[in-house]
């Protein structure tokens, strides 16, 4: 299924423009919505999940009007919000069984089959009788995915799903999302560049409520190749380099400051060509240094 968003806008009562004429085509597969905190990602997710109204624009899931046919959308939607609460004294099986009943699975035998299958899929079957309050952050997130998959939804929205996970749990979660995205439309909202780089075949960068860039990650990286330069600098000299060059990122590596700059020509001063990454695309775009034609959003 394809999700088509056209000129979607939302301004809050305090004057904050959360979405400014957002237009996106989201095809089947994993689609990454990448942006810093406060970019408008969660507002967009809540509107798509039929939990919040927009001011203007249209959204269609194939032929279904998402903004007007909310009940129809909810029947084929799975949603994992950024803040997913659980009942700490209830077991994973009990709560998932309850959610399945709410989704309309009234036949006990069929419901048990679905719940057991989802717990197996999310690697939680062995702890199904354990109280949710004892789950780690990663286990709670995988339980969140399990509840989002009830009813075999065709559109799945996950909002900042790996924030706070340790590296091992993040890998496990990536593998789970990758399997899910094989035959469904999965919209992954995150500020973590590696989540999009590892998982998504299509993506968009959003900042201050506006879509700045969209396309396939590998093509976006190719579009910035030969424009990224790097060198190590002394920390005391960093302000000078920031004044003289289009510095898009700095990071400490083994106690030294590694600087990346965006420049179509050799900036000199000891800078060397660097292999571009999706992180470079992201930082250059957010900084307003890179504005490429990346195809139809």
Image: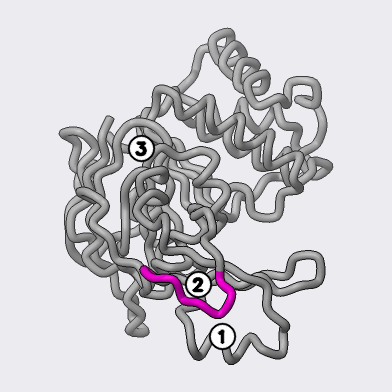
**How far from the left and from the top, in percent, is residue 12?**
34, 76
| 227 shown above or below 124 | below
Q: Is residue 52 left or right of residue 282?
A: left
Q: Secondary structure at mark 1?
A: helix
Q: Which residue is mark 2?
A: 261
Q: Position of residue 147 (x, y in %)?
A: 56, 33
Q: Nearer the viewer, residue 2 or 108?
A: 2
Locate residue 73, reporting x and y percent: 30, 37
Q: Is residue 38 above or below residue 110?
A: below
- SS for dot 3: helix
Q: Residue furthest top?
A: 109
Is label 2 or label 3 in front? 2
Residue 146 lies, with reference to residue 203, above or below; the image says above
The N terminus lies in quadrant: top left
Residue 268 on the magenta segment: yes
- Between marks 3 and 1, how big is the CA–CA gap? 51 Å
At 18% across and 64% down in the image, what residue appears? 56
Tell me the number on the disc at residue 74.
Answer: 3
Q: Give the residues in magenta.
A: 264-271
In the foreground, 105 or 148? 148
Q: Earlier in the sequence, mark 2 or mark 3?
A: 3
* Disc 1: which residue: 241
Mark pair 1, 2: CA separation: 9 Å
In terms of image quadrants, where is residue 151? top left
Q: Which mark is residue 281?
A: none
SS label for mark 2: strand
């Amino acid at each position: 299924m394809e999700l088509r968003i056209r000129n979607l806008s939302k301004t809050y009562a305090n004057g904050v423009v959360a979405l400014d004429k957002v237009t996106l085509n989201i095809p089947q597969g994993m689609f990454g919505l990448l942006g810093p905190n406060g970019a408008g990602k969660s507002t967009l997710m809540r509107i798509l999940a039929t939990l919040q109204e927009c001011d203007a624009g249209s959204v269609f899931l194939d032929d279904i009007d998402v903004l007007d046919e909310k009940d129809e959308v909810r029947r084929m939607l799975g949603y994992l919000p950024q803040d997913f609460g659980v009942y700490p004294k209830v077991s994973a099986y009990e709560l998932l069984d309850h959610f399945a009943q709410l989704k309309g699975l009234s036949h006990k035998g069929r419901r048990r089959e679905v719940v057991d299958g989802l717990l197996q899929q999310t690697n939680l079957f062995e702890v199904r009788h354990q109280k949710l309050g004892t789950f780690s952050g990663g286990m709670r997130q995988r339980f969140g995915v399990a509840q989002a998959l009830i009813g075999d939804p065709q559109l799945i929205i996950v909002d900042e799903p790996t924030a706070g996970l340790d590296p091992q749990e993040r890998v496990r979660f990536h593998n789970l999302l990758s399997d899910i995205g094989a035959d469904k439309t999965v919209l992954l909202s995150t500020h973590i560049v590696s989540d999009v780089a590892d998982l998504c075949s299509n993506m968009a960068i959003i900042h201050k409520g506006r879509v700045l860039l969209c396309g396939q990650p590998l093509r976006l990286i190719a579009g910035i190749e030969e424009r990224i330069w790097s060198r190590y600098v002394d920390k005391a000299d960093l302000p000078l380099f920031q004044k003289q060059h289009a510095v898009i990122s700095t990071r400490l590596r083994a106690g030294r400051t590694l600087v990346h700059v965006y420049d179509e020509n050799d900036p000199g001063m000891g800078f060397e060509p660097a292999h571009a990454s999706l992180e470079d695309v992201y930082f250059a775009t957010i900084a307003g240094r890179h504005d490429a034609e990346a195809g139809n959003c």
